Amino acid sequence: MMVSAGWMALGMALQAPADTGAVLYGAWCSSCHGADGRGVSRPTVRLEVPAADLADCAISSAEPEDRWIAIVRDGGASVGLSIDMPAYGDAATPEQLRAVVRYIRALCGEPGWPPGELNLPRPFLAEKAFPENEVVVAAHGRGQELIYERRIGRRLQVEGAARTVADSSPEFGGFTAALKYNVWHSLARRALVSIGLEVTPPWGRQPLWEVEPFVAYGWNPGGGATVIQGEVLAPWEDTEGWTGGQLRLGVGQQIGRVVPMLEAGWTVPREGQQTLALFPQLWVQLSRLGHVAASAGVELPVAGPDPRRARLVAFFLWDYGDGPLHRGW
């Protein structure tokens, strides 16, 4: 295996300029991650933890290019990962770092995976368009919700959410199951669109079957600091039919590890009074790796039936697809 890997690296060196991603990968990365990137280290290499499978599309596509460059430049310890991953910042130019990262991300070899550049910070109200592997614990006034999201393949996500209310009633709040599928994404336009369906059975405090088809979208104009996300829903209830429509829209500004956001939730029922509420909130990246985050804010009713009372909103998020909860700090 060592001989074949050596001949492969030599062959790449003879066929390509010295600064190409393939040659740099062979020199910097192949001894630990394997010549094909699948994490099979050479027998002479001893690692604290197994090397990552860089050919796994779920790994290589999940993070933006700049995050990958930072890890190669500053080493694994810079984001709370293993010290086995060295820092190449002092020995490499920015062009070399970008070349090797693009080569690594190309090891996936499967088109259709939404790139990590489109994985925008989660808002409180609107559903993210990016398919995720996350656990979220959320609070909305007296209500609590536990959400589990699981990505399947390139574009599909399944989700389950259990709800309860902190009041004098022992009755369970309810449960919702959902499917989401990314139908379009464009790295050049920094945008993506997903469609989905939420189903809530008549359990606990939920009196009727409820089905909510939705469209979720995200946009990062020009790849800058501004993020725009939204969702359109059309709820349907058993015996009632279509009950109206909902529009959720949020705008945020990324400032390092902090993203202040403002969301609006507008509900137009088939009958009755429309409601509009604003949700100013602050999203914070807690871990250096970026897989743990939290958000806190407030719901401010603007229009709708009285009484209109402000309510606190918050969530804690763990992206378990990026790593265990105890790592990355």
Image (cartoon, rainbow, N blue to C red):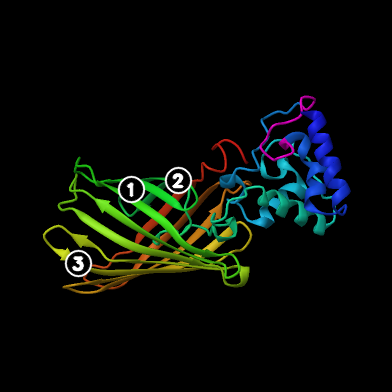
Q: In the rendered view of the protein, which quadrant contains the C terminus?
A: top right
Q: Name which of mark 2 and mark 3 comes first in the sequence.
A: 2
Amino acid type at image mark 2 = Ile
Q: Name which of mark 3 and mark 1 comes first in the sequence.
A: 1
What residue is rendered at 69% in x and 40% in y? 37
- Numbered mark located on residue 39 in the image: none
Q: Determine which residue is flagged by label 2.
A: 152
Q: Is residue 240 above or below residue 105?
A: below
Amino acid type at image mark 3 = Thr
Position of 169 compared to 127: left or right?
left
Q: Is residue 224 visible?
A: no
Position of 180 compared to 93: left or right?
left
Q: Determine which residue is flagged by label 3.
A: 243
Element under label 2? strand
Please state which of residues 111 and 289 is positioned toward the viewer in this rendering.
111
Give the spatial CA distance, label 2 vs label 1.
26 Å
> Callout 3: few (<14), some (14-19), or many (20+) C-alpha neighbours within 10 Å?
some
Q: In the rendered view of the protein, which quadrant contains the N terminus?
A: top right
What residue is rendered at 57% in x and 43% in y? 322
**Predominant secondary structure in magenta?**
loop
Magenta stretch: includes residue 73: no
Q: Which of the 4 quarters of the picture holds residue 53?
A: top right
What residue is rendered at 66% in x and 31% in y? 50
Provide the residue span drawn in magenta.
Answer: 33-45
